[in-house]
Image (cartoon, helix red, strand yellow):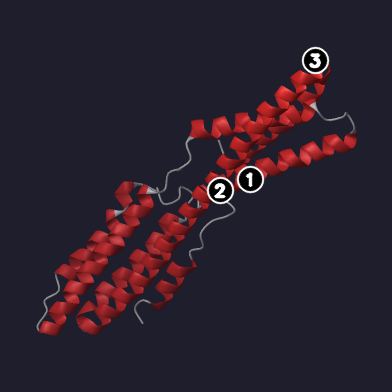
């Protein structure tokens, strides 16, 4: 199920719960019962608010981590290119391969399938580059030092690419999300129980339900940073492609 569908379902559960509460309002008994219901709903509302806050913080932290890893990958690619340039003219083909590898990373990461385009495609990005660096034949101590540094940096690029692949899945548990939506639905049922029946209240509850659905939409979007509306920009890697080889 897509993010928009999930958000629409959350809105339907919340707003439908509010309308259900309005329908059940006449069934509420004496005032003491209402007070107990308010206490229980207050507890649910507190838990829902805390969990929503944790979800937003977790999703935002994951988004920022992946963005930082991507920027670091771009910086490492540029630095690797400069190390190869200082090695000598023997690395011209290796630098071209590096440029092609970074361009392919962009294509794979921002494809319709995201960075999980398939593990079989990942070795084809970094391994030929590492093999070419290993096959260099340094003639001086300086070249040997540059080759060793280039090998380490190529390994770091491959590690970051595999890390992005492993992080491509959702970090939000489906049962966890279902429980939060259930709490929110109960909360909106309580709103309907104690709200008068007029259009102002109905519109307010609708806007509130839309806000809650928007929060879930934001959380899910941040949890999938390489697709959707709120996605990480490929600009760092694009700039790296423009610089590499020059």
Residue 184 visible at all? no
**Distance between mark 2 and mark 1 Cα atoms:** 8 Å
Q: Earlier in the sequence, mark 2 or mark 3?
A: 3
**Above or below, comparing residue 236 to residue 165 in the picture:** below
Judge left or right: residue 225 versus residue 10: left
The residue that disc 2 covers is 56
The residue that disc 1 covers is 215
Judge left or right: residue 180 versus residue 143: right
Q: Which residue is nearer to you in this view: 24 or 141?
A: 24
Q: Element at badge 3?
A: loop
Q: Element at badge 1?
A: helix
- For mark 1, does the 10 Å Cα neighbourhood hold few (<14), some (14 to 19), or many (20 or more) residues? some
Residue 196 at what x, y percent from top left? Answer: 87, 29
- For mark 2, does the 10 Å Cα neighbourhood hold few (<14), some (14 to 19), or many (20 or more) residues? some
Q: Earlier in the sequence, mark 2 or mark 1?
A: 2
Picture quadrant of residue 185: top right
The quarter in which the C terminus is drawn is: bottom left
**Distance between mark 2 and mark 3 Cα atoms:** 38 Å
The residue that disc 3 covers is 29
Picture quadrant of residue 95: bottom left
- For mark 3, does the 10 Å Cα neighbourhood hold few (<14), some (14 to 19), or many (20 or more) residues? few
**Distance between mark 1 and mark 3 Cα atoms:** 34 Å
Tag 2 and tag 1, C-beta contact below 8 Å: yes
Q: Which residue is nearer to you in this view: 121 or 6?
A: 6
**Above or below, comparing residue 40 to residue 116 in the picture:** above
Q: Which residue is nearer to you in this view: 152 or 95?
A: 152
Q: What residue do we see at 72% from left, 41% from top?
A: 210
Q: What residue do we see at 37% from left, 72% from top?
A: 75
Q: What residue do we see at 89% from left, 35% from top?
A: 199
Judge left or right: residue 196 versus residue 2: right
């Amino acid at each position: 199920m897509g993010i928009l569908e999930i958000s629409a379902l959350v809105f339907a559960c919340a707003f439908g719960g509010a309308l259900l509460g309005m329908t059940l309002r006449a069934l509420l008994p004496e005032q003491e019962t209402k007070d107990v219901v308010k206490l229980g709903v207050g507890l649910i509302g507190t838990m829902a608010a805390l969990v929503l806050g944790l979800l937003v913080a977790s999703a935002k932290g994951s988004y920022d981590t992946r963005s930082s890893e991507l920027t670091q990958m771009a910086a490492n690619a540029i630095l690797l290119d400069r190390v190869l340039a200082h090695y000598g003219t023997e690395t011209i083909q290796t630098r071209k391969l590096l440029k092609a590898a970074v361009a392919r990373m962009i294509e794979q990461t921002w494809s319709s399938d995201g960075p999980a385009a398939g593990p079989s495609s990942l070795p084809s990005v970094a391994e030929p580059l590492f093999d070419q660096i290993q096959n260099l034949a340094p003639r001086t101590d300086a070249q040997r030092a540059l080759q060793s540094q280039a090998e380490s940096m190529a390994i770091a690029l491959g590690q970051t690419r595999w890390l992005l692949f492993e992080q491509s899945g959702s970090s939000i548990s489906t049962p966890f999300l279902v429980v939060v939506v259930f709490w929110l639905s109960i909360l909106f049922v309580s709103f309907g129980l104690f709200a008068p029946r007029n259009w102002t209240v109905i519109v307010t509850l609708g806007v509130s339900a839309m806000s809650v659905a928007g929060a879930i939409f934001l959380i899910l979007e941040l949890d999938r940073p390489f697709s959707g509306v709120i996605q990480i920009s490929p600009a760092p890697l694009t700039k790296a492609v423009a610089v590499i080889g020059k």
